[in-house]
Amino acid sequence: MYCDVRYSQSMADNYFIPLFKENDRTNVVVYRSVKFSKILVGVSRCPHCQKIHQDSTLHARIYAWGLAVILSVISIIVSLKIDSILGTIGIVLVPMLFLILIGLLGSTLLENVLAKQKGILTKKDGVKRYEIIRAFLSDGWSFNPPTA
Ligand SMILES: [Zn+2]
């Protein structure tokens, strides 16, 4: 499915994605609730692709968070040289933003790049192309839980 070469050999190889569907909605004046079903659908994935995905995720996290830490340290050093309110804000705020932005966005982006480099579909692309998932989506299921 992810490489169109091999098939999954065990349940553990497959990539599982949760799908949600609304059951019923309660709308009382001050009380709102929504009940929904949740299922895990497995996208067929061979052990080879499973390994690539696993490694890409791990490596992407190491690179992205490593870069975030380095940039944070640099910004702390720069902030310390600026002796003002701005500098104080810089010591706390800028490194925090660096960490969160680069860490989270960077690891997701890099993970996809690494998977593509190995010539297989990203986890997300594989999910989108899977016919069973498409069938569920057109039946009213969604990737996100419904909000109250
Ligand atoms: Zn494969």
Image (cartoon, grey):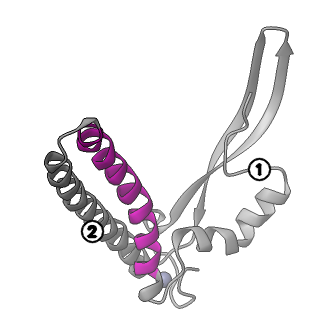
Quarter holding residue 31: top right
Identify the amino acid type marked 1. Answer: Trp
- Magenta: main secondary structure equals helix
**Residue 135's spot in the image, x, y percent?**
80, 63
Point out the image quarter for the C terminus: top right
- Report whether 116 appears left or right of 19: left
* Residue 141 circle label: 1
Instruction: Using the numbered discs, state the Cα–Cα distance from disc 1 to disc 2 in whole angstroms.
Output: 35 Å
Q: Which mark is residue 63?
A: 2
Q: Is residue 36 magenta?
A: no
- Element carrying mark 1: loop
Q: Position of residue 21 (x, y in %)?
A: 76, 42
Q: Which span is picked out in magenta? A: 86-115
Q: Amino acid at mark 2?
A: Tyr
Q: Is residue 103 magenta?
A: yes
Residue ID at (38%, 77%): 52
Q: Secondary structure at mark 2?
A: helix
- Front one among 47 and 96: 96
Where residue 51 sits: x, y (%)?
35, 75
**Which quadrant holds residue 102?**
bottom left
Residue located 41% across and 54% down the image: 101
Specify the quadrant of the image occupied by residue 38: top right
Classed neighbour count for the residue bearing mark 1: other residues with Cα under 10 Å, few (<14), some (14–19), many (≥20): many
1 or 2: tag closer to the N-terminus: 2
Q: Quadrant of the N terminus?
A: bottom right
